[in-house]
Amino acid sequence: MIKKFVPSEICLACQGCCRFKNIDSTWSVALLDSDIKRLLRHNIPPALITRDKRVALEPAKGEEYFFCSFLRRDNNSCRVYSFRPWECRLYPFLVQKKDNKTFLAVDLNCPYARSRFRTIDFNKYTLYLRLLLNSPRYLKTLKSNPHIFQEYAGTELISEINI
Ligand code: SF4
Ligand code: SF4
């Protein structure tokens, strides 16, 4: 479990997440193997999980975005919130690949992260994440899910993860 950085009420009022510009967006949710097992245990239709281990996106008529299949667009909430994927819990932080190394990064397109970037609270939280992600348990999980390491444009790298 990862402690939340952005309060839920801020996210519910924001439309920055869960929608993507392209159907094959790098930013769409990549799933750990344990996420897939958990989603299937909760009777999520397997068709909503793509072959490359992502949550399927849905096109919407007249909209410029593709939506996560689990987004409730009437109230901007997540249908699977209590068992949502690991990447959704981590965002606006990300595990990022760069030059054959792996980093903890932050997406400053998130207005909450941007407004707190490098504040004391931000630095405390990133220290917590750095320790968590470098713990033996997390390193084991990350190593066995290499498909989630991706390159993202426009993020700020915070620290290397020693995988
Ligand atoms: S962009 Fe940031 S504030 Fe907005 S929904 Fe996403 S995590 Fe929450
Ligand atoms: S699973 Fe939930 S939190 Fe994650 S992108 Fe989809 S709607 Fe958003």
Image: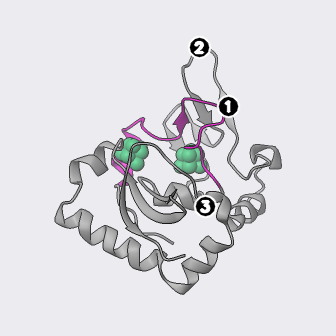
Quarter of the image for residue 66 reads top right
Q: Position of residue 152 (x, y in %)?
A: 49, 47
* Disc ID at residue 83: 3
Q: Residues within 10 Å of mark 3 (few under 14, many from 20)?
A: few
Q: Position of residue 129 (x, y in %)?
A: 40, 71
79 or 133: which is nearer to us? 133
The CA span between labels 1 and 3 is 20 Å
The residue identified by callout 2 is 62
Q: Is residue 22 magenta?
A: yes
Q: Position of residue 38 (x, y in %)?
A: 71, 64
The residue identified by callout 1 is 58
Figure check: 126 above or below 15:
below
* Disc ID at residue 95: none
The secondary element bearing badge 2 is classed as loop
Figure check: 79 above or below 128:
above
The CA span between labels 2 and 3 is 30 Å
Figure check: 15 above or below 159:
above
Tag 2 and tag 3, C-beta contact below 8 Å = no
